[in-house]
């Protein structure tokens, strides 16, 4: 069993004034594919490296399975790691790179050979076994790095931004390969990335981090539909959610979100959560697909906008507008005609609107 | 960047002058080994009196000279050079790796000491060095003067600074993730050094070895001080002194012995030329 637990873990680098990871608590289940995502410097790689044993733990406890591993050296943690720059040994050929760890453990030669060939077959590396890393393409090097990790039959597979050095096309295909590998190996995967697309497409659950603090830890769907705070709402989803300041106004039994000269009716199921904010300003979030077609436009969901330009993305158009000088992106199917440049009206789907407290940045309702 | 034609001509002329200036002593040595002693004195620069049979006679006279003992001196030079180079590469590599990877005040201070030692001229330390080695010999009971271990130890000290300086620059360019990957694969720190780092240092170690090798092989001052002119242990450059008397200098034999001493280094340089240049460039830009 290889669940991973962080119990009140703090990591402070020598000489640093504040911890890079303060008081982290995290429970990763056995065989889960977990993504650690966040902007640069958010502590995601440090967290991964603490699991690997490459960083010391200042305070708290890290468990792999039932075993406390704070003081266990990396080689005895039953883990394997794939690095961002692959970290292949340049003077060894592919076969030796993959078998290096097994040789150090003095495994039986025939068994090493079997495992190397098995991994090479899965990763389509059989014809490259005698080549040195410098003779391989980026994708091939990445597969060798995966192979080196695979042959050890680890309980936990750690991947530190493994696709960031690859071009967009190769990245997409390697994403699929890694997801397949997880299904095949059926072990715990912890994957670090700053790319939210990788996070959304690969993980069972995603840990969104900012300044060393876990902002939200849940499935991709939950993160997308019900972000806990403004940071998660902005980070998850590409292009990011549209945000605009809105004044909450009570008129009789109706509640409105007023964006300067635009008055938007708040649906009944959101009234209860928003009622305490009447007379106050909040942040309203609308994803680019959360806009309604022209025929569903009413006076209670219309935003007056200025159409700037459109981008054809293939199946969709991304319309770039401004609403009261706030940039807004709207997605419409490419079968529809994009709006003309100049003054325009768009209809917000208020059922899907997200509201955030302006001070705490926490979600009020979705 | 394209060079102007006039600049090209000026640089070519300057390069030629430097090449001629540098190669002229070598030309004199090679040319005069083809002459007998009288020919050298009467016409040291010209081709008069040059013959291949004279070269063979000179070589035979040097190799078979009872005072000179060519093969013994050659063997001593080989042992001292090889031992020094092996130890310099090994301990220099280890020191550079630790200095590079342990970022502490102490490692920085040690690195600075290495750098500082490079700018102190040998002539400043040579006399205190001999007296210190004499004291150490008495203290530990092992002769550090007039002995191979003593001079090898001294070469490791004098060559250590440049070796560590060049290797540190190279190691900085080796991704630290390789060592982390090795740690996860199960390597101890020693294993990481010998299995991962040391093999990666091969090009730059070749360069350093050639540079140190040329210096140690050709060095005259340190062995003449530490081994002495009349000691039992003699390197080739010191042994050549056998042909230098108070009244007579046997130039034909001195120059032939010098040529025989130079030849191994030239052969090694020609064979490893590509490797040396690669190592120099890699050390410079990584």
Image (cartoon, coloured by chain):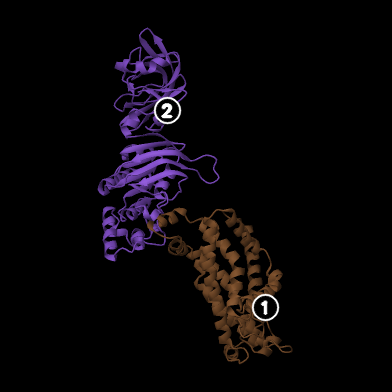
Vertically, is A158 above or below A322? Answer: below
What is the total number of numbered labels drawn onto the structure image? 2
Q: Chain letter for purple?
A: A
Vertically, is B203 above or below A346? Answer: below
The reply to whether residue A269 is visible in this rendering is yes
Q: Chain of mark 1?
A: B
Residue at point 61%, 62% (across, down): B114
Residue A244, picture quadrant: top left
- The spot of residue A159 in percent (x, y) is 37, 47
Could you tell whether A291 is left or right of B200 in the image? left
Residue at point 69%, 86% (across, down): B244
Report the residue marked by disc 2: A230
Vertically, is B208 above or below A304? Answer: below
Q: Are callouts 2 and 1 both on one chain? A: no
Report the residue marked by disc 1: B225
Q: Chain letter for brown?
A: B
- The spot of residue A255 in percent (x, y) is 37, 12
């Amino acid at each position: 069993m290889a669940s991973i637990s962080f119990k009140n873990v703090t990591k402070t680098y020598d000489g640093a004034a504040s911890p890079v990871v303060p008081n982290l608590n995290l429970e990763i289940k056995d065989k889960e594919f977990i993504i650690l995502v966040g902007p640069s410097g958010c502590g995601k790689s440090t967290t991964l490296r603490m699991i690997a044993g490459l960083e010391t733990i200042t305070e708290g406890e890290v468990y792999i399975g039932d075993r406390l591993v704070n003081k266990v050296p990396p080689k005895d943690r039953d883990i394997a790691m794939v690095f961002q720059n692959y970290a292949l040994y340049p003077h060894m050929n592919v076969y030796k790179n993959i078998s290096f760890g097994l040789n150090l453990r003095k495994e039986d030669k025939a068994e090493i050979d079997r495992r190397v060939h098995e991994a090479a077959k899965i990763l389509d590396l059989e014809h490259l076994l005698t080549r040195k890393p410098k003779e391989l393409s980026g994708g091939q090097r990445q597969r060798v790095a995966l192979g080196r990790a695979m042959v050890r039959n680890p309980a936990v597979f750690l991947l530190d931004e493994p696709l960031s050095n690859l071009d967009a096309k190769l990245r997409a295909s390697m994403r699929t390969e890694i997801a397949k590998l997880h299904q095949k190996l059926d072990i715990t995967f912890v994957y670090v990335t700053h790319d939210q697309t990788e996070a959304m497409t690969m993980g069972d659950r995603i840990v969104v981090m900012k300044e060393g603090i876990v902002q939200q830890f849940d499935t991709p769907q939950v993160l997308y539909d019900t972000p806990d705070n403004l940071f998660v709402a902005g980070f998850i989803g590409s292009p990011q959610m549209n945000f605009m300041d809105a004044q909450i106004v009570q008129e009789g039994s109706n509640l409105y979100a007023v964006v300067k000269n635009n008055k938007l009716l708040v649906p009944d199921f959101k009234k209860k959560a928003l009622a305490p904010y009447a007379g106050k300003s909040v942040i309203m979030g609308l994803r680019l697909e959360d806009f309604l077609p022209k025929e569903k436009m009413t006076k209670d969901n219309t935003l007056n906008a200025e159409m700037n330009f459109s981008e054809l993305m293939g199946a969709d158009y991304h319309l770039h507008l401004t609403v009261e000088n706030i940039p807004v992106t709207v997605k419409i199917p490419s079968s529809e005609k994009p709006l003309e440049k100049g003054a325009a009206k768009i209809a917000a789907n208020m059922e899907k609107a997200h509201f955030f407290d302006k001070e705490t940045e926490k979600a009020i309702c979705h | 960047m394209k060079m102007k034609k006039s600049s090209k001509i000026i640089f070519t002329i300057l390069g030629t002058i430097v090449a001629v200036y540098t190669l002229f002593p070598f030309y004199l040595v090679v040319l005069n080994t083809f002459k007998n002693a009288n020919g050298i004195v009467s016409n040291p620069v010209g081709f008069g009196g040059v013959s291949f049979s004279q070269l063979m006679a000179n070589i035979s006279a040097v190799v078979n000279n009872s005072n000179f003992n060519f093969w013994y001196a050659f063997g001593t030079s080989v042992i001292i050079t090889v031992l020094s180079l092996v130890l310099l590469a090994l301990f220099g590599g280890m020191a550079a790796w630790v200095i590079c990877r342990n970022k502490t005040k102490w490692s920085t201070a040690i690195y600075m000491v290495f750098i500082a030692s490079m700018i102190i001229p040998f002539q400043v330390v040579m006399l205190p060095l001999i007296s210190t080695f004499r004291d150490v010999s008495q203290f530990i009971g092992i002769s550090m003067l007039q002995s191979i271990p003593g001079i090898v130890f001294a070469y490791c000290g004098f060559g250590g600074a440049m070796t560590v300086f060049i290797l540190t620059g190279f190691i900085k360019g080796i991704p630290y993730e390789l060592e982390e990957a090795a740690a996860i694969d199960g390597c101890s720190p020693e294993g990481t050094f010998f299995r991962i780092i040391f093999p990666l240092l091969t090009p730059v170690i070749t360069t350093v070895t050639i540079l140190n090798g040329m210096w140690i092989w050709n060095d005259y001052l340190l062995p003449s001080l530490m081994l002495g002119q009349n000691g039992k242990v003699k390197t080739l450059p010191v042994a050549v002194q056998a042909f230098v008397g108070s009244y007579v200098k046997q130039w034909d034999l001195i120059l032939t012995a010098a040529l025989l001493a130079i030849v191994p280094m030239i052969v090694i340089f020609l064979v490893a030329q590509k490797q040396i240049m690669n190592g120099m460039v890699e050390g410079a830009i990584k």
